[in-house]
Image: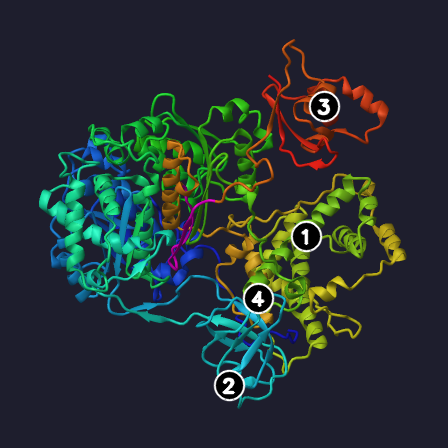
Amino acid sequence: TSTLPLSEKRCASWPDPKPSSDCSSACSVSSVPAAALKLKGSGTDIDEGLYSRQLYVLGHEAMKHLQTSTVLVSGLRGLGVEIAKNIILGGVRAVTLHDQGVARWADLSSQFYLREEDIGKNRAEASQPRLAELNSYVAVSAYTGALVEDFLGGFQVVVLTNTPLEDQLQVGEFCHSHGIKLVVADTRGLFGQLFCDFGEEMILTDCNGEQPLSAVVSMVTKDNPGVVTCLDEARHGFESGDFVSFTEVQGMNELNGTSPIEIKVLGPYTFSICDTSSFSDYIRGGIVSQVKVPKKISFKSLLASLAEPYFVTTDYAKASRPAQLHVGFQALHQFCAQHGRPPRPHNEVDGWEDATELVTLAQAVNARAQPALQQDSLDEDLIRKLAYVAAGDLAPINAFIGGLAAQEVLKACSGKFTPVMQWLYFDALECLPEDTKALTEEKCLPCQNRYDGQVAVFGSDLQEKLGKQRYFLVGAGAIGCELLKNFAMIGLGCGEGGAVTVTDMDVIEKSNLNQQFLFRPWDISKFKSDTAAAAVQQINPHMRVMSHQNRVGPDTEHIYDDDFFQNLDGVANALDNVDARVYVDRRCVYYRKPLLESGTLGTKGSVQVVVPFLTESYSSSQDPAEKSIPICRLKNFPNAIQHTLQWARDEFDGLFKQPAENVNQYLTDSKFLERILRLADNQPLEVLKAVQCSLVLQRPQTWADCVIWACHRWHTQYSNNIQQLLHNFPPNQLTSSGPLHLDYVMAAANLFAQTYGLMGSQDRAAAAILLKSVQVPSFTPRSDVKILVSDQELQHTSASVDDSRLQELKAMLPSPEKLPGFRMYPLNFNKDDDSNLHMDFIVAASNLRAENYNIPPCRPSKLIAGKIIPAIATTTAATVGLVCLELYKVVQGHQHLESYKNSFVNLALPFFSISEPLAPPPSPEWTLWDRFEVQGLQPNGKEMTLKQFLDYFKTEHKLEITMLSQGVYMLYSFFMPAAKLKKRLDQPMTEIVSRVSKRKLGHHVRALLLELCCKDESGEDAEVPSVRYTIC
């Protein structure tokens, strides 16, 4: 075995990245705990195939805590079922559903697991079978008795919804004194309330869930406190109060291996640490890494916190409302206790309406409050609105509060993420009609149908309007499923003339079941759109939904054409990539349709509402570019597992995709060499060398050849290149040797064989025997090799091209004629197939390189290598709840910009940013929503010619068109040759478009979008909008 400069902590074999268990989803509820919670050492098996995206949010340790937690959810109306759904998807051990009430018509407004035939049945018992289907690893049971202490003592977390305040206090005191964590959630129409009590002492293991940051040290001063300066290629990203540790610092060795040090940020590249005045002199180098330090937090009991509350703000424009609503909700509990019902919707009769009584009760509550909480001036209008809508039950509000509450339960079980401390209040009063006189008590009376809870808030007129809506939903994944559920509950497209069209070309995979709650294990491999459409029709049989399997893009404009879009009332995006979002956004701008845009990333969610002529569009602003890793950092000086994973991902393409593609082009494209020789710098030489290696030097004939190739590749990357690096940058000491990594060889050899169409092998023992006979040439570092240390240095390095070497390589390549029928098979990286060895190679290659550089290996390799979007059901539910609140406003036709809300939430912190959208970017006379409308078909039945088009703008708009284009095609320009222009001027516009684009216009095309450059009457360039040129 060669002496290798590897870390002393190298191990002989790496953990198998494949899921360790895959319990059948068909097992019965009663047998779930035994089947799903198989002990393995001190932890439990986790079905990584099911929980893959959630694992990237919570991590394995938090998931193990969830799998040993039992939760009680009391109250199975709309809010309770939403919380239970999210907790069950999250993967706790067991959930008990408690409710002593029976289903009523009003419950169907938001309780999506109750059917019309369930009216009169116990809500918990009716919901249990449907909730149990969500996750076969979670035992779900129903309980209809009283919440006595012996019963409560069996749970780690208790959730109370729709519970009288007196009962909340009684349960709260018991839970606080017995170490049981408590979540209280309530929704009243457009208002929501959330309270958390996780005990006198809770250990918080990770406050935000973000990956620990790291940076390269360039200087440390000897001072009190010492000041650390990081390389200026990127901001360090630390915050004051963070804890950090140091490794690989040369000179000031006292920093290496010390316990975590608290820092104070001084600037984007500097921060102060402890007293370093007595330390050794700093010489060079070092890596500083953020350390997650456990933190103790303490909660007051419900009784104590009711008197001395601390609030989490959801909307800083309403900063005073939490304290007002704290009083209002207490008054509301008193009203309900006295009358046995909530205030009647918009009740104003005989001057002593329910709203006035609630205001009086609130004033009394405020008068009894402690001085610190007592409001100088009670917001009577806010309390009155609380009374008007308190009888309502809205699916979007339940989705938002339910998502938040379920996330708090997961925090309570796992100790991960910062809990709500301790009260959160929310309202969406902007959803009410802008005309305050539009609602009357008569319009809000119950009609004994499934929308009574919504009619109580908005009246019957909006319900009728919702039913007539025609909406287009793009995507049926996690957000798409939640949107469809909310659409069904609020009655969108459920009336005469209404409909929802949903399209998604994907099929259901096992990992989808953890967030996309409309799908079940037996739906795997079915189309998402078909399955989701069928599922929501079970939730609301009146739902009119049509499912498609089309990608929305230029290639489907014959399907989603002018007629389709013009018949829509709005569009909702449920997409996972920016390009598709931008395309749909541009279509909505063109057709002037409102767009509901949203997205999630782990515990983060965002919502944007786009309203024609009122707001900017999605494309009006762009997210900052994704942070890239410097090339030299990836190639020679990685310091984080993200760097080694990206390096391994590049290695995969460089070994198993690009060489095969180049060989195939060389064999089939006669102009391949001509194009390659025109490439810049050293690229022609590198490509020709790769082709020669693939066809001549390294072309395998057998499986054994592939194993030998993999062995040599291993030595090149993890021995020879590292020795060369150490030769150029000598360390203080060499690390010990390590064994050959068989995982790497097996994955690399099999993938290499696949690119040549050869049969591979999974026989590790045979491969190990074969490797013993491989002769590995000794390696001696060269003194003439220059290793670049920064991308700036790379940019200033010009490579000289040896023409004679290029010609020599060309001559050495076998001619395509000598290889008839031969081809290679490029491998496209696929993270989701655990049998294809792609992730096996990535994990092995990354972790080997990590050991080279003494970087701790990382388990969730798929997240970085596959660029997987982390996801969790709680965030999706909360985000979609906010989307559907905007839908209410869009359908009503709100005209004031301040009525609408864009939102960003991070449930891990928790953090909320809710603000009004931006107006469309202005220009002197027009915005992105404006355009010229030109009717191409003239009264005589003939189409407008180019000359007539130019004359029309000169006559009607006093504009001289200097250039005219359609898409990427130039139709007219002032510098066009005279002969060509003369011929074109008399041609109809559509004929010009067809000739220039060399394709006929489809029968579905009713209009063209044309772009202009113009001069005004003074000869100055004029900014003008686009032209919608209508053909028919």
Q: Position of residue 140 (x, y in %)?
A: 25, 48
Q: Which mark is residue 541?
A: none
Residue assigned mark 4: 235
Residue assigned mark 1: 702
Q: Position of residue 810 (x, y in %)?
A: 85, 50
- What residue lies at 28% left-to-right and 39% top-to-bottom? 394
Residue assigned mark 2: 224
The number of callouts visible is 4
User: Residue type at mark 3?
Assistant: Leu
Q: Which numbered mark, 4 or 1, is in the foreground of this view?
A: 4
The front one of 426 and 36 is 426
Q: Residue furthest bottom?
A: 278
Q: Quick check: 209 left or right of 923?
A: left
Per the model, the C-alpha gap separating discs 1 and 3 is 69 Å
Examine the image and state in which quarter residue 737 appears.
Answer: bottom right
Residue assigned mark 3: 950
Sequence-first disc among 1 and 2? 2
Sequence-first disc among 4 and 1? 4
Q: Residues within 10 Å of mark 2 (few under 14, many from 20)?
A: few
